[in-house]
Image: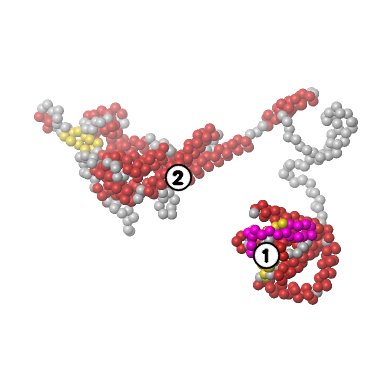
Amino acid sequence: MESHLPGLPVQSLRGIPELKYVNADNVVRYRAIMRFFYQEYKRLRYWLKPEDVFEAVKAWNVWPDYTLELCQGDLDQLVEWQNLTARHDGGRSSTLEEYLKKKMQYLLRPYSIEIERLLETLEKVTGYGGSLEASLFDTIADKLFDIRSQVGELEPDAALELWNVLYRSFVNLHENAADYIASLHTARAEEMMVTEAFLIFKEKLTDYLQNFVQALQRSAYKIEGNLQRINDSVRDLFLEQVVEGELRKPRLEDEPDREELLEELRQGWTNIRRWFVGEGAAPSELTLLERATKDAIARIVRSAIRIQERKRSGLSRKKELEHLARWFASIETVEEAHRLSAYAFGLFPTRHLQGEDLRDSDRADMSSWEERPMVRMLRSRSRKRGERQPADAVRDNERRKQREREAFKLRQAEEWRMIAALLDRSSVKVSELGPVTAKERLRLLQWIGRCMTTGNGHSFVTPEGVLIRMSNPRTAERTILHAEDGELEMANYELHFRLTEAANGLAVGTAAKQGANGADIAAAEAAAAADTAEVEGEAGSRFESEVRSENEAERQGR
């Protein structure tokens, strides 16, 4: 199988004998010895004698009947596992026999130091921990700006210090934020979010998360902008200075390889850029962190709302109401009952009940409590099904529908006659129109309004298939339209009328039918007009009002 880890050394995949003491049979003794070495290492005591180790382990009382011989054997085993290194101690010998007697000193090796440091950290872990340090965003933004503005002027040592601060801030931000957000999704956090004690903690937690999101949003654009302005040449120049500063450190051990160190720094820079800017179509880790923080805020608010709703729904005032009822029952006069009601309930919300006011007296000083009550049936609010009410009869609206239908046909016939007359003229200006009726004026204004609101084409098609187009919507020429109900000063618009192809056949058939049955159609229209005078008047008034409103809106828009 092809490896997906290019450049991974085989040495890093070897077994680790230094970890054997963590799971060995006598793990308590080995762990005690290694912990003593680590504590002395932090006190800057490095080479230790077996007698010192034995006294410390004996004082801790971790193993009954522990002897110096057992301690010496444990030390030799740890040396074999490469946890300790040993050297001969002959500096304080006073006789030849003491010098020849084998005395050793032991030193903690680097692997073991890191193992003990890890174990010490693990002992302190009680949860995810973590924190949301908003100040790290400002630190990262400032350091990136320094790199962009001072890349050619930095000394190697200054470049190394700048990189260490930048990458350490980035790692702390990433790890602490990830741990903190994860801690909000643990089972312990879920249990806490359903308790009433969470309401006290909710405000602080919400403010903490909101402040972090605000700092993130405030600094994200600075960081992203600086990263995008730092091109590959600037990046490589800066990282070369960092490598130079790292190689300047005097070392007694093997010096790190320059190319490996540079590749490691490039990978770290790539991590920073991918975290803040993203890679390809995938969202950046910064975006995911912001989304996760906002989701956490929403979860906290929802949990608080559920707790409050549960408190309200579970609150019972039965005992209070029973006590108040017994109090009312013990009162002997209605005046005292009024006073108690005012103290207990205050003013009641007003309800307006309709009914007949039956007064037995015309006295102005007569109280409503002395008058005869007005009985009114109130509708129950119970969810139980009430008495079945008789269903209302379905009204027959056929005659009204027929009248409306005939009135509509009459209006359509009038509109078609007007359109047919204008089709013969092909185009017409407002100034060329003679006196028109009120309905024709409204219809004309409706057409003008529709042409003005249809966009660049300034045209529309009627239901009959007639294309009406306005050719001069921005004309400054004015004219007066004469109508039977008055005169209207307006722009001298020019309208063009043309039948669409789909309506040509229909128009020819309709014209032939009207020529053959003109008398019958006229008689039918007269009968319909006589039968629907009232309905037509109402519909015409409504139609005229709608058109007038549209034209008024059009004039205001212009």
Residue 370: mark in rendering: none
Q: Residue at x 32, y 43 (%)?
A: 150
Q: Is residue 401 left or right of residue 131?
A: right
Q: Is residue 344 above or below residue 150?
A: above
The single residue placed furthest to the right in the displayed view is: 361
Label 2 SS: helix
- Name the kind of residue labelled 2 in the image: Leu
Q: Earlier in the sequence, mark 2 or mark 1?
A: 2
Instruction: Mark 1: give few (<14), some (14-19) or many (20+) Cα within 10 Å.
Output: many
Residue 453 horizontal/vertical position (percent)? 64, 58
Residue range (magenta): 471-488
Distance, label 2 to label 1, CA atoms, is: 62 Å
Residue closest to the eye, 517 or 140: 517
According to the image, label 2 marks what residue? 289
Residue 183 horizontal/vertical position (percent)? 45, 40
Instruction: Mark 2: give few (<14), some (14-19) or many (20+) Cα within 10 Å.
Output: some
Q: Quadrant of residue 393?
A: bottom right
Q: Residue at x 65, y 65 (%)?
A: 469
Q: Residue at x 67, y 69 (%)?
A: 498
Q: Is residue 228 above or below residue 28?
A: below
Name the front one of labels 2 and 1: 1
Image quarter in which the N terminus is found: bottom left
Say if mark 2 contacts mark 1, CB within 8 Å: no
Q: Is residue 517 magenta?
A: no
Q: Residue at x 79, y 25 (%)?
A: 334
Residue 440 horizontal/vertical position (percent)? 75, 62
Q: Quadrant of residue 60?
A: top left
Residue 191 visible in the current orientation: no
According to the image, label 1 marks what residue? 495
- Name the kind of residue labelled 1 in the image: Leu
Q: How is the image coloured?
A: secondary structure
